[in-house]
Image (spheres, grey):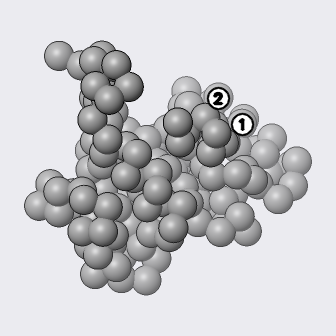
Amino acid sequence: MPFALNWGIMATGHIAKRFARDLLTDPLVRNTDDVRHRIVAVASSTSKEKAQGFCVEVGAPLGEVATYSSYQGLVADSAVDIVYIATPVSHHFQNAMLALEAGKHVLCEKTLTVTPAQTEKLISTARAKGRFLMEAVWTRFFP
């Protein structure tokens, strides 16, 4: 059985859609058979319906994906292993902290934060919690 990584998608904009579609691509296309990515939750800051519409648009199995109208609901979901943060840069710090404090691993769109002090705080929190934290770089994550 391949390792399965369960993703929560925080925000429903254009970049999040591109990332989600890539997660849903069959790993065999890349000659990979030891890992599988699943989208298990999606959150919009405005409405559950927007999160549901996101699932339909990217082809995520709506009946298998929890949808939330708040980011707190997303990070509280025990099925989520890692949160992909695609919110505006001005909100990256607070959203990454929310996910880390909830015990989630984090992949955050660039730019990770707006100040070095915020970045240092995220790194120290991730280390203290034993969580993975990474800034997403499109050339790495959109092969």
**Residue at coordinates 24% horizontally, 57% vertically from top-left?**
60
Looking at the picture, which amino acid does disc 2 mark?
Arg
Other residues around mark 1 within 10 Å, as few (<14) / some (14–19) / many (≥20) = some
**Residue designated by label 2:** 127
Q: Is residue 11 visible from the viewing direction of this image?
A: yes
Q: Position of residue 57 (x, y in %)?
A: 30, 68
Secondary structure under badge 2? Answer: helix
Tell me which corner region of the image, top left, top right, bottom left or bottom right, holds residue 51.
bottom left
**Residue designated by label 1:** 123
Q: Position of residue 87 (x, y in %)?
A: 58, 66
**Residue at coordinates 46% horizontally, 76% vertically from top-left?**
45
Looking at the picture, which amino acid does disc 1 mark?
Ile
Image quadrant in which the N terminus is located: top left
Which of the two residues, 96 or 85, is positioned nearer the viewer here? Answer: 85
Q: Are marks 1 and 2 in contact (CB under 8 Å)?
A: yes
Which of the two residues, 21 or 130, is positioned nearer the viewer here? Answer: 21
Secondary structure under badge 1? Answer: helix
| Alpha carbon distance from label 1 to label 2 | 6 Å
Identify the residue at the far front of this view.
29
Vertical position of residue 115 compared to residue 72: above or below: above
Identify the residue at the far left of this view.
63
**Residue at coordinates 26% horizontally, 50% vertically from top-left?**
40
Q: Position of residue 41 (x, y in %)?
A: 30, 56
Other residues around mark 2 within 10 Å, as few (<14) / some (14–19) / many (≥20) = few
Which of the two residues, 133 or 128, is positioned nearer the viewer here? Answer: 133
